[in-house]
Amino acid sequence: MRKTVFSKKAVSENTWMITGGGCTCYLLIGENEAVAIDTGYAKENIQQYMQDLTDKPVRRCLNTHGHFSHTGGNGYFERTYMTSHALMAATVPYEECNPADYCLRYPITILVDKDIIDLGGRKLEVIEIPAHSIGSVAYLDKKNKMIFTGDEVGEVSLIWKDKRQPYVEDFAANMERLMQIEKWFQTVLTGHGDQVYSKNILYDSYENGKKIIQEAAEWDVLTDDDMNAISHYIPEIQYKRKSVHGQSTVLFDKRFVKR
């Protein structure tokens, strides 16, 4: 058995969670093929790792958004799917990455809201939910009662280095949209960590967004521990705040709350 940076965890019979490569990735297996959701940015070939987990061909990958920690391994696949907004960042390595270590040119198909990806007996519906990143989508698997949300649910950072900073209202609106389709899923799978959430996290996230909007006096400044957990440089730190509600943690810029 070859040495690998990746670890696997079975979410269900035909769904694997893959960690160890910058983000949490997923392998979804249908009757005709399997696909990856996000690819991390490990230098190791994640497509080969995933292919060893199934006898179905793993040729395609789907990105939840364009940040390089979710797209760096795209070049190992025959075709990548993402939104046009995600395309703007997907092939831009982080400063700490050596571009020579990655394949940054690969075939891309652009996704839009409500598109369907058919794996054979298993369909994924694209749901646009841009906040953490303007190019963010979720993938809804109605048959298996799952939704894959990338970095828009869980511990959410709304203070990334993207040129367009999101408003907290954008985040709350996304959570409200997901709550409107909650009858189609029971399990929420996010872009970091190995936890499998129930859909109750959406209620915590929505209420957290509303709490931020309504209760400015209770916003917390970021601690040293918060800063140590953030892997990228945050400019103008004096404006950054944190709010926790239940299972939801949101980092945001106080200037981007409309109130």
Image (spheres, rainbow, N blue to C red):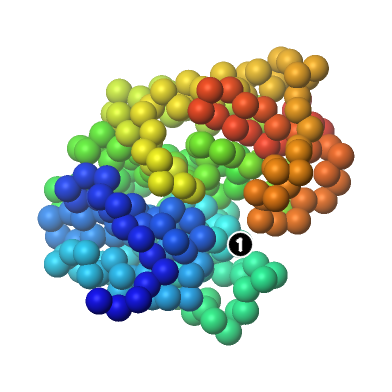
Which residue is label 1 attached to? 89
State the image quarter where residue 186 is shown. Answer: top left
Where residue 124 appears, as percent x and y from the top left, is 29, 46
| Location of the C terminus (image quadrant) | top right
Residue drawn where x is 84% and y is 37% of the image: 239
State the residue lying farthest toward the bottom.
100
Image quadrant where one finds the N terminus: bottom left
115 w.r.t. 216: above or below: below
Residue at 21 percent of width and 55 percent of height: 29
In the figure, 162 relative to 201: above or below?
A: below
- Foreground pick, 38 / 109: 38
Amino acid at circle 1: Ala
Crowding at dot 1, Cα within 10 Å, few <14 / some 14-19 / many 20+, comes out as some
Q: Position of residue 56 (x, y in %)?
A: 16, 65
Position in image of residue 164 (x %, y %): 71, 47
The quarter of the picture where residue 26 lies is bottom left
In the displayed structure image, the side of residue 34 where residue 214 appears, left or right: right
Q: Position of residue 67 (x, y in %)?
A: 57, 58
